[in-house]
């Protein structure tokens, strides 16, 4: 059995004729992380292209491609459902407003998911007694996250487009800054304790900023 990832990010499994559905599902699940990683790499070029914010355009959410679906209605709304970013608008759609509309939606989703991941990681690494003062989300371009002198962690809205393991790495990176402000040996020793594969993840994030 093998996995095929198409240019549009869609995934297919190539299997022998008599393979059962259960065996296919088990095989695909065993390759879940590999699939997510390669789908994100293949569709990553979308982040570096000029977005037009038109119907059918592909964007990303948690490392997976999502399709933009725009329609006129009696209200203005934006929401994510089953791999589709739905945008409803009064009157005709203005693509020039697309970036602002999507950033607002992404920020709303990011606040919820980032807080869930932070709670999960604080519980998982409770022995380290990390105590961030707050978690904020901002639309930034030059960095994925930061930690203030007062212990407040800020994450980029754009991070919500990345896989969960990449999001967790950025959060852990900033949590480690609560102990060590600079990127010295003690910082990286702590980071490796909580995220042993940080080098690989860091490399991937740097290549897809």
Image (spheres, rainbow, N blue to C red):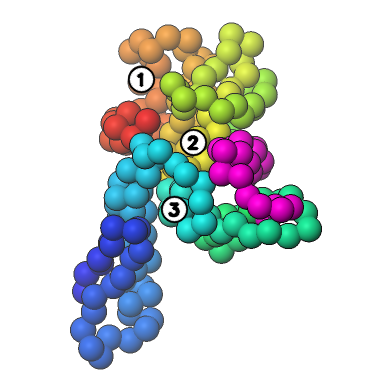
Q: Mark 1, residues whose alpha carbon is within 10 Å: few (<14), some, or many (≥20)?
A: some
Is 109 covered by the magenta stretch? yes
* Disc 3 residue crowd, few under 14, some 14–19, many 20+, Cα 10 Å: many
Q: Residue at x 59, y 27 (%)?
A: 138
Q: Which mark is residue 110?
A: none
Badge 2: residue crowd in 10 Å (few <14, some 14–19, many ≥20)? many
Q: Going from the N terminus, do you reach mark 1 or mark 3 first?
A: 3
Which residue position is annotated with label 1? 188
Locate residue 102, reporting x and y percent. Answer: 59, 42
Choose the circle earlier in sequence order: 2 or 3: 3
Q: Which residue is mark 2?
A: 159
Would you say 152 lies left or right of 8 here? right
In magenta, the rendered stretch is 88-113
Q: Position of residue 186 (x, y in %)?
A: 38, 14
Residue depicted at x 62% and y 23%: 132
Give SS at disc 1: helix
- For discs 2 and 3, the disc positioned in front in the rendered view: 3
């Amino acid at each position: 059995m093998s996995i095929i990832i198409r240019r549009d990010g869609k995934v297919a499994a190539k299997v022998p004729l008599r393979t059962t559905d259960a065996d296919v599902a088990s095989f695909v699940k065993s390759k879940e992380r590999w699939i997510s990683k390669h789908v994100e790499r293949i569709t990553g070029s979308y982040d570096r292209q000029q977005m037009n914010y038109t119907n059918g355009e592909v964007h990303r959410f948690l490392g997976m491609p999502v399709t933009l679906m725009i329609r006129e209605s009696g209200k203005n709304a934006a929401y994510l459902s089953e791999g589709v970013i739905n945008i409803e608008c009064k009157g005709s759609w203005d693509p020039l407003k697309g970036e602002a509309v999507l950033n607002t939606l992404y920020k709303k989703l990011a606040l919820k998911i980032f807080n869930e991941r932070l709670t999960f990681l604080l519980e998982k690494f409770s022995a380290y007694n990390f105590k961030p003062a707050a978690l904020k989300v901002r639309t930034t371009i030059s960095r994925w996250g930061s930690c203030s002198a007062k212990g407040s962690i800020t994450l980029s809205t754009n991070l919500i487009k990345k896989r969960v393991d990449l999001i967790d790495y950025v959060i852990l990176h900033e949590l480690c800054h609560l102990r060590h402000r600079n990127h010295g040996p003690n910082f990286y020793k702590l980071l490796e304790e909580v995220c042993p594969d940080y080098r690989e993840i860091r490399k991937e994030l740097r290549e897809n900023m």
